[in-house]
Amino acid sequence: MNIVVCVKQIPDPAEPGALDPDTNTLKRDSKAILDEADSYGVEMALQLAGDDGEVTLVSMAPGSETGGLRTALAMGAAKAVLVSDEALAGSDALGTAKVLAKAIERVEGYDLVLTATESSDGYTGTVPEQLAELLGLPSVTFAKEITTTDGGVDVQRQTELGYDEVSCPLPALVSVTAGVVEPRYPSFKGIMAAKNKPVDEVTLADLGIDAGSVGWAGADQTVVEVSAAPEREAGEIIEDEGDAHERIVAFLDELKVL
C-alpha cells in the first residue's frame, strides 16, 4: 500500500518565538519541528505500508524548511514533497488545503491519504475535510484504528460514546487522532539515511497555481489584532450557615440549569 501523509512543521513549543508586529502572525524564521499530532499519522502509515508499500510526506512550509520532514523521513518515510513559496505567507485553511491537494496530485499511485485531525498551532480542524473534497476522495475522520481490506479500509471512528465501525473504499482520506499508536523514535541509522532521502521542493508555479488568479484563497487572511486571554475571575465562596443548598439552587436557577 502506498500512503501519503500530510505533515506540518511548526515552531518548537518549547521555544515558540514571537509575533510579527506588522502582521500579528507567528514568526516562522526559527528551526521547525514535526508537529506531534502528525507523528501518529506517520507511524500509522508506516505500519499499514509494511515492507511492500511506500510512505510519501507532503508539507507546506516557509524558507525551504525541512527539519520536521527529516524527522519523519528518519522514522521510515521514503520521500517528501515540500511546497515553499513566499506568496503562501498568511494562508488560511482553505488556501492550505488547495496547495496540499495540488502537491498530493504529484504523487503517483497512492492508495490512502492520512492527516492529523488538526495542527497544534492552528487548531482549525477543517483542512482534512477540505482536502478530501478537493481531491474527490471519501473521508473518514477521528480514526482510532485502521485495518486494510480487499480494496478498502475498515476504520474505528472515535466518538464521545465509543467508536463507530466504518468501511471505506480506496483511495480515501482518513484523519487520525492523537495517541492511536506509539510513534517510533528515529534510530541513528534512520537519521543518517534521512539525509539522503529525496525531498521534492516546489513552488506555486510548479503546482500550476497563480497566486493572483480568481478563486485562489491563499495569502488572503489578515489578523487584525492579537490580545491576551482575560484572566479567570475568582469564583464566589459560599459559607454554609444552614442555607447553602438554597443559595446553590438559586445560582443554578439564574444559569437556567434548573
Image (tube, helix red, strand yellow):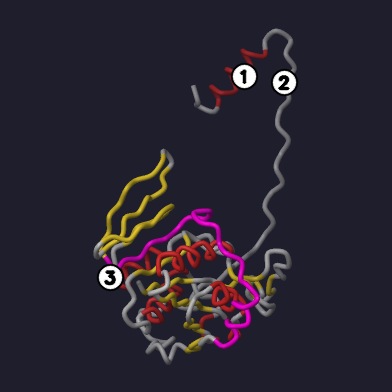
* Visible residue check, residue 179: yes
- The amino acid pointed to by label 2 is Ile
Position of residue 100 relative to residue 195, above or below, is above
* Visible residue check, residue 25: no
Q: Can you give x and y, in whole percent of width and height, for residue 220 in the image?
A: 48, 76
Quadrant for residue 209, please give it. Answer: bottom left
Residue 238 numbered mark, or none = 2
Residue 136 numbered mark, or none = 3
Q: Residue at x 73, y 35 (%)?
A: 234
| Of the pair 238 and 36, the residue shown nearer to us | 36
| Of the pair 17 and 141, the residue shown nearer to us | 141
Figure label count = 3
- The amino acid pointed to by label 1 is Ile
Disc 2 vs disc 1: Cβ atoms closer than 8 Å?
yes
Quarter of the picture holding the N terminus? bottom left
Q: Can you give x and y, in whole percent of width and height, for residue 111 in the image?
A: 32, 72
Write the start and end of the magenta stretch as one range.
Answer: 170-196
**Closer to the camera: disc 1 or disc 3?**
3
The residue tagged 1 is: 248
| Of the pair 78 and 37, the residue shown nearer to us | 78
The verdict on residue 192 being magenta is: yes
